[in-house]
Image (cartoon, rainbow, N blue to C red):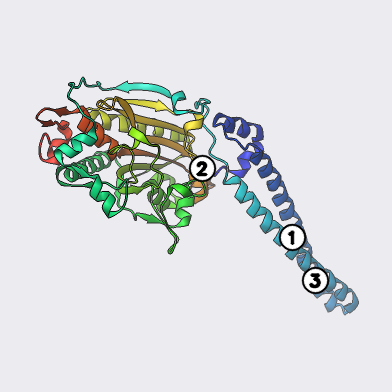
Amino acid sequence: MLQISFIRQNIELVKERLSVRYFNDISIVDRVVELDKLVRKLKVETETLQAEMKTSSKEIGLLLGKGEKDLAEQKKQQVALNTNNIEALNASLNLAEKQLQDEIVRLPNLPHSSVKKGKTPEENEVIKNGGTIPALPATAVPHWELIKKYDLVDFETGAKLTGSGFPLYKGKGAKLQRALIQYFLDYNTAAGYTEYLPPLMVNEASAYGTGQLPDKEGQMYHITADGLFLIPTAEVPVTNIYRDEIIKETDLPVRMTAYTPCFRREAGSFGTDVRGLNRVHQFDKVEIIQLVHPGESYRVLESMVVHVEKLLQSLELPFRILRLCGGDMGFTSALTYDFEVYSAAQQKWLEVSSVSNFETFQTNRMKIRYKDAGGKTQLLHSLNGSSLALPRIVASLLENNQTETGILLPAVLHRYFGAPSI
């Protein structure tokens, strides 16, 4: 959530940065500013009347002590009138504050100055390419055929158990999932991230804190009887660990990593985009999250990008890094880098990671703070990244490394998988 003080002092800048996103209701900014003025006006009026009541109450006691009952009675009547006026003002103030909150949460984060204006993924900027795209034999097939050939994932039984988009991993397919998860966690913890294993359901306050609510209600599975949501990513529960906390500056940065299954209702488009593991409702992902000093967040963002880049290099996959344009960024992000790996049999790029700086957007909602050298409480910056999402990594590993005698695995996975190939 944007800070009202920043909006108040930078109205035109806020509108300009939102236009980079092609945000289609800039008028919300004006409504926020007007409601903020009303809230502050009502607070001043309330505080003025409360001060008058306090003074009058003291005067009543003095007048009664002097035996001036008539004057004391007049003061009492004025206090009673002010009491009624304060109740009316408080009712108006509560309504105005609710209206202000309802409007401000509809505003997405402001894009960083480096983010270019653009509407579509085609306008994202490719900033780096890595690895080598393999030359596959003419007999190469996409991963959904390899999955059947080697009996790795059973989509039909998964659909029987739950529904379309819920794969059932089995045999070496399940073992490969476990190997990748353990490798990713080991890689992250070796870099200084503390591992967590969080709940897979969160309450409304947690979903609101990271920006899933009120923006992404339709994308989450909602357990209505209990008011809980299945998590779309480990970012939600893990970042909320520090909700309403003041972290010692000496304890910064806070680095966290977690593996979780992830659940998303929106499975996306039709056709080859959703075939096999390309897009599913339930998938495994390892996440990295950092809470950092505001002055360090963009340096930390670049270090997280390097962290994910080296992880992809270790998997020997061809990849590229994109800086997203304003219209393709998530609601909460100020700057996002996407990582895509090349799926050789499909001859297409598949997104496997997003690394983002949210600045104070999430921490303002969650009230995650620190005290600066002067003892003043300040908001921290939050960042997160996928390290990594498994389905498309698996798809690319299978397709890019297929041979006539099996599927070769990168060297870093041999000890985790227990064999060099499938």
Q: Quarter of the image holding residue 323?
A: top left
Image: 372 above or below 326: below
Whole-number angstrom distance, CA of label 3 to CA of label 1: 14 Å
The three-letter code of the residue at mark 2 reads Phe
State which quarter of the image contains the C terminus.
top left
Q: Name the N-terminal-most of marks 3 and 1.
A: 3
**Mark 3 Cα-neighbour bin, 10 Å: few <14, some 14–19, many ≥20:** few
Give the percent coordinates (x, y) of residue 116: 51, 25
Q: Name the N-terminal-most of marks 2 and 3.
A: 3
Residue 26 shown left or right of residue 108 in the figure: right
Whole-number angstrom distance, CA of label 1 to CA of label 2: 30 Å
Secondary structure under tag 3 reads helix
Whole-number angstrom distance, CA of label 2 to CA of label 3: 43 Å
* Residue lying at 29% horizontally and 41% vertically, measured from the top left: 192
Task: Look at mark 2 in the image and give the residue it sits on.
Answer: 361
Task: Look at mark 1 in the image and give the residue it sits on.
Answer: 89
State which quarter of the image contains the N terminus.
top right
Image: 311 above or below 34: above
State which mark lies toward you, 2 or 3.
2
Give the percent coordinates (x, y) of residue 215: 51, 46
Q: Is residue 341 visible?
A: yes
Q: Is residue 373 visible?
A: no
Image: 155 above or below 309: below
Numbered circle sitting on residue 80: 3
Give the percent coordinates (x, y) of residue 17: 58, 31
Q: Name the N-terminal-most of marks 1 and 2.
A: 1
**Mark 1 Cα-neighbour bin, 10 Å: few <14, some 14–19, many ≥20:** some
State which mark lies toward you, 3 or 1.
1
Q: Nearer the viewer, residue 114 or 401?
A: 401
The three-letter code of the residue at mark 1 reads Leu
* Residue lying at 68% horizontally and 53% vertically, measured from the top left: 96
